[in-house]
Amino acid sequence: MGVEQRSYELFFRPAYKKLQSGREVNFMRIAYFLQLNMGPGTGVYRKVIAQATTWQQMGNTVAFYVATKSASLADDLQRTCKILGIEVNCEIYAGKLPPPFDGRLSSLSNLIKKLEILPPDIVYTRQDIYLPPLKRLLGHYKVVVEVNTNDLGELKNASRLFLFVYKLGRHILLGKASGIIYVSKEISNLPHYNLFKTPKLVIGNGIDLAATRPLPPNADKAIRLVFIGQSGQSWHGIDKIIKLATLRSTWEFNLIGISKEEMPDGCPPNVALHGVLSTNMYEPILQSSDCAIGSLALHRKDMKEASPLKVREYLGYGLPVIIGYEDTDLHSEENFILKIPNCESNVEESIHQIDNFIGNWKGIRVPRKSIESLDYNFKERKRLMFFREVGGLAEDTIHNHNNDKL
């Protein structure tokens, strides 16, 4: 037996058992299989790490199977998961040509061969472009797909040829999956998702509250607002933040993830563009802020509802938030969220509500107790229950030994 196989057998050891009121419960072996190129510091990277960590802390056995074109990402994932006690299997592809000619086909095939050494109970993956090696995965294992966005809405400007090929692949992926988990009710009910009769569940994005410390409030008289985002995403509504900065010239605005190169027309003097920053670098900016800003133009990709990771992060730090959509988890009675209309003129129409909201929260942080339901410990229990149901593990892995006769 080779060293590689022994490591897999150690990883995929027999499922844990735990006695609970006379009941013996077998826990699951979960393979997290994904294409990942958003590295450390991004919300997606932190999310997949937090999910896997939470599953393992709850007694399950978890392994990553990751195809990436970033050697540094693979190294960081290996280092991080070694500390956490999570097995990692990475395949690095060249990424110099458009998919699928960039090397990812062989990377995915190699990962599936590794996964087959000792099969998991559940394979979890994020929706991505479908590639032929996934056919074997879908045909032999219970695969649950996480859907994070309205894919066809984002691809509405793609070429006809690409859309044709993409739609064929998504039909195979979502049609043959054992389960689908959506991050919002709206996405789950879209016609091009609702046509699949695959078992589904809605779980909004969460946060690891234990890893996010509440920041003390800004003690300055100056009013400061902060936004964290990425370039090239019109639904963030950066132009609307610039409009707000123009309307409120005495306020200070810090935009993280947005660089000067992306603002060729410039911006008002009360707006600072910081570009991409690490968590350690932007935490002081959050601490000096009174309020955070979420997406303000979700209507630009024909959506009304979302559960963005960045908004959960703001709240984890204690910042109240202004958003322009319906949040999957946060409702109108939550006074630490200001929801303005989801339309082009929402900033101008809501300027007085924004004034009042920031005035009410100046010098105050969001109470931790108010956001406990966003914690991964709460959300991942629901996800694990769904895994058991779609994997056929809900009942037959639970045995009542009180009825056994000696």
Image: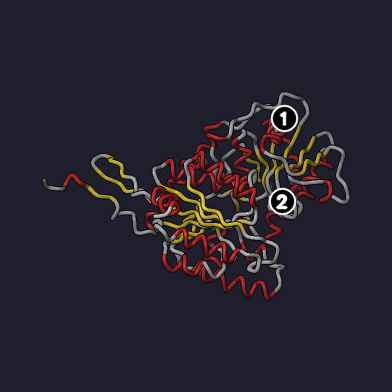
Assess disc 2: are there few (<14), some (14-19) or many (≥20) residues with their C-alpha within 10 Å of its C-alpha: many
**Residue 77 — which label?**
none
Quarter occupied by the C terminus: top left
Q: Sequence order check: which comes first, mark 1 or mark 2?
A: 2
Secondary structure under the numbered disc 2 in the rendered image: helix
Assess disc 1: are there few (<14), some (14-19) or many (≥20) residues with their C-alpha within 10 Å of its C-alpha: some
| Residue occupying the point 31% across, 44% down | 17
**Residue 288 — which label?**
1
Where in the figure is residue 72, as x and y percent of width and height?
64, 48
Residue under circle 2?
236
Residue 332 shown left or right of residue 142 in the figure: right
For the question of whether residue 7 can be seen, the reply is: yes
Residue 46 image-quadrant placement: top right
Q: Amino acid at mark 2?
A: His
Q: Is residue 189 above or below residue 59?
A: below
Q: Is residue 97 above or below residue 379?
A: below
For the question of whether residue 329 can be seen, the reply is: no
Q: Which residue, as the protein is rendered here, is positioned at the far top?
A: 219
Q: Which residue, as the protein is rendered here, is positioned at the far left?
A: 406
Where in the figure is residue 216, as x and y percent of width and height?
65, 26
Quarter occupied by the N terminus: bottom left
Residue 301 image-quadrant placement: bottom right
Instruction: Give the image's coloring scheme.
Output: secondary structure
Q: Name the foreground residue: 95 vs 355.
A: 95
Q: Is residue 51 above or below residue 128?
A: above
